Image (tube, grey):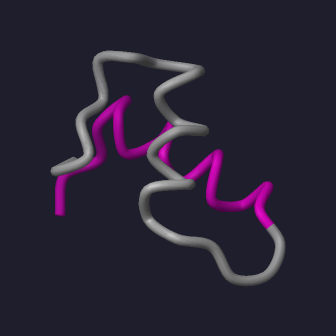
Amino acid sequence: MRDTPQREKILSVLLRLKGHFAIKDLHRLIEVEDPSIGIAT
């Protein structure tokens, strides 16, 4: 898997979360920081 800025942003958000979460909730948090990242990423 390639290391991209989008994936780095997703990882950054994931590492801040605690416990279980829905993918839609994760996407909302990522979208706040970078609206160009789609849910398919």
Q: Is residue 13 above or below residue 14?
A: above
Q: Position of residue 41 (x, y in %)?
A: 21, 48
Residue nearer the viewer, 3 or 16: 16
Q: Is residue 26 above or below residue 36?
A: below
Would residue 27 be found to the left or right of residue 16 on screen? left
Q: Residue at x 63, y 59 (%)?
A: 14
Residue 26 location, quadrant = bottom right
Residue 41 is a magenta residue: no
Q: Residue at x 60, y 38 (%)?
A: 29
Residue nearer the viewer, 22 or 9: 22
The quadrant the N terminus occupies is bottom left
Q: Residue at x 48, y 47 (%)?
A: 10
Outermost residue toward the bottom in this view: 20
Q: Is residue 21 above or below residue 23?
A: below
Most frequent secondary structure within the magenta stretch? helix
Residue nearer the viewer, 6 or 32: 32
Marker count (numbered): 0
Residue 10 is a magenta residue: yes
Residue nearer the viewer, 19 or 11: 19
Q: Position of residue 25 (x, y in %)?
A: 56, 54
Q: Position of residue 32 (x, y in %)?
A: 57, 21
Question: Magenta span covers which residues?
Answer: 1-17
Q: Residue at x 26, y 46 (%)?
A: 39
